[in-house]
Image (spheres, rainbow, N blue to C red):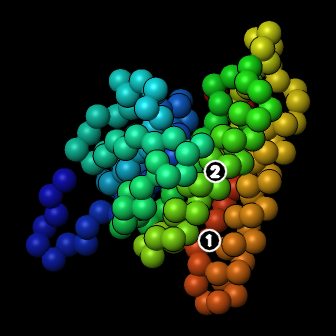
Amino acid sequence: MASAPGAAAPQRVFVAGASGWLGRNVVEAAVARGLQVTALMRGSSDTSGVLQHPSVRLVVGDVCDPGSIQQEWFEGVACVVSVLGLRSMAVTDEELWRVLRDGTLAVFRRAAAASSVQRFLLVAGGIHTTPQGLPCRGMDHNAAREAAIDEIASTCQAGAAEGGGITWTAVDASVYF
């Protein structure tokens, strides 16, 4: 995407969880608004559903392995959108917490270390199923995300008290259609 001489470069957003239904839609909406997107996907993810566009940079990492999330991916990023989730609740509690708490925090910590990031948006929710394929009515996924939100809130408040930091928003719409 070329810019006219003297024109400001398009803002860059980072989307964690870009291969899921919601993540793909966030990437498409950002591109439609003229934003540059860095889209984080697992190595095992199918990239065919993610928008192939000159404004989209696909990066591969595992949020459960913080060392695989590269700091340079956040350079020039103004906003991080985390839509991490699980496609099924047919996972162990340990895996659920590793993705929803630890994975979210791994992305947030990289974002907080980048001088350009101004906002962190955590979008939670979705339809989760039990190992039997029924809608999940348990609250483990909420507890895991809330544990991440507590640390994000504390870190952002500390940064604000020092005259800096990033702002954050958490949204849980529970079900998307």
Q: Residue furthest left?
A: 5
Query: In the image, which is nearer the foreground, mark 2 or mark 1?
Result: 2
Q: Which amino acid does label 2 sit on?
A: Thr
Say whether residue 82 is left or right of residue 145. left
**Whether label 2 touches label 1, CB < 8 Å:** no
Total numbered circles: 2
Q: Quadrant of the C terminus?
A: top right
Q: Is residue 2 above or below residue 138?
A: below
Image point (46%, 26%), residue name: 44
Q: Is residue 47 above or below residue 164?
A: above
Marks 2 and 1, the one that precedes in the sequence: 2
Image point (41%, 45%), residue name: 39
Which percent across, then down, holds residue 1?
Answer: 19, 53
Image point (53%, 31%), residue name: 20
Crowding around mark 2 (Cα neighbors within 10 Å: few <14, some 14 to 19, many 20+) is many
Label 2 sits on residue: 104
In which image quadrant can residue 116 be found? bottom left
Say whether residue 11 is left or right of residue 166. left
Q: Is residue 126 above or below residue 35?
A: above
Say whether residue 2 is left or right of residue 154. left
- Determine the CA span between mark 2 and mark 1: 16 Å
Which percent across, then down, holds residue 31?
Answer: 35, 47
Q: Which amino acid does label 1 sit on?
A: Thr
Label 1 sits on residue: 167
Which percent across, then down, holds residue 111?
Answer: 52, 64
